[in-house]
Image: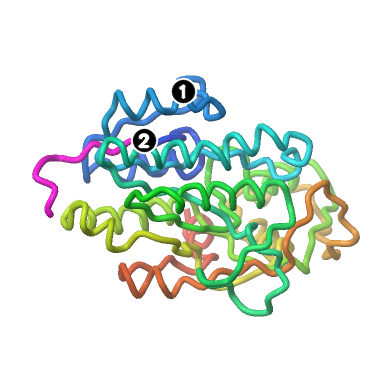
Amino acid sequence: MLMTKTPTILVIGKNGQVGWELCRTVGTLGNVVAVDYPEIDFSDPVTLRDLIRSVKPSIVLNAAAYTAVDKAEEEADLAMAVNGVAPGVIAEEAKAVGAALIHYSTDYVFDGTKQEPYTELDEPSPLSVYGKTKLAGDQAILSVDVPSMIFRTSWVYGWRGKNFLLTMLKLAREREELKMVDDQIGAPTWARAIAEATAQVLSQGVRGGNDFFQDRSGLYNMTSRGKTSWYGFAKEILTADPGRDEHILRRLVAISTEEYKTLAQRPKMSLLDGASLSDVFGVTLPEWQWPLGLWSQS
């Protein structure tokens, strides 16, 4: 059935990279209500339930997550509350008010042993607490009979918040040498591209109504096209930086995962196959270098 009135779109996590972009992208599709901490506590199911019951949204976009991959190894309970439990609570309440749910997941649900891009049918096997808690959130949503889409993305970056892009720009102005891992392969994905792809899906859903979301519920990979390593990503960032004259960096050195010890183990190869997103919704994301090319011309 068609949505007969302007939908209310609840964005949870408005201050995050993806949430911030969503607020600026989906506004033409409905009445947007956006929240974040400390307005709500993502680790407290009661506040989440109260939020959804009071707003009574038509569509919920959950962009909130615990994303500190290494710190999650030391804060496993908190990471599980936010990434694993909260999505299930949101799904239950979305079902109760008749809303559809869109949630964002990660490539880190896979162990990286596959030599080609992962599809939605591949069995997850996360290596880190972060990956395990995100997988728990996916499973919690899928266990609730609610119209829902889970978009798995990867290596998210943007012009705000904490991410690899901004870290590289800062370090290039502070250090003469940087060592970057060159044997972990993925697809850096611009937060705005995720928001715009989501808006394309939502625009179809607003026209198609509840049946659209129900019929297309499930997992979808939503990442940029192409691939690179952290070393390759860093090199592209530093080359594209319009303020590169300010760099004191003289050497960017490629190293192996074994040479760069971290608390959390990361997948060596976490490319995601986006064919289903394209086949079902006609939506594809740009090549991973594209936003950096625009930036370098600014």
Q: Does the magenta segment cover residue 3?
A: yes
Give the image location of residue 266, x and y in percent.
74, 58
Query: Residue at (31%, 53%) from the top-left corner?
Result: 199
Q: In the picture, which quadrant includes the N terminus?
A: bottom left
Residue picked out by circle 1 = 46
What is the three-letter code of the residue carrying label 2? Glu
* Quarter of the view holding residue 118: bottom right
Left or right of residue 98: residue 60: right
Query: Residue at (60%, 60%) from the top-left corner?
Result: 107
Above or below, 63 against 255 in this view is: above
Residue picked out by circle 2 = 93
The crowding category of the residue bearing disc 2, from other C-alpha atoms within 10 Å (few below 14, some 14 to 19, many at least 20), is many
Give the image location of residue 277, x and y in percent.
39, 68
Task: Magenta stretch: give its range.
Answer: 1-11
User: Who is closer to the viewer here, 149 or 68?
Assistant: 149
The crowding category of the residue bearing disc 1, from other C-alpha atoms within 10 Å (few below 14, some 14 to 19, many at least 20), is few
Mark 1 lies on a secondary structure that is helix
State how far apart marks 2 and 1 are (Cα).
11 Å
Give the image location of residue 125, x and y in percent.
68, 62
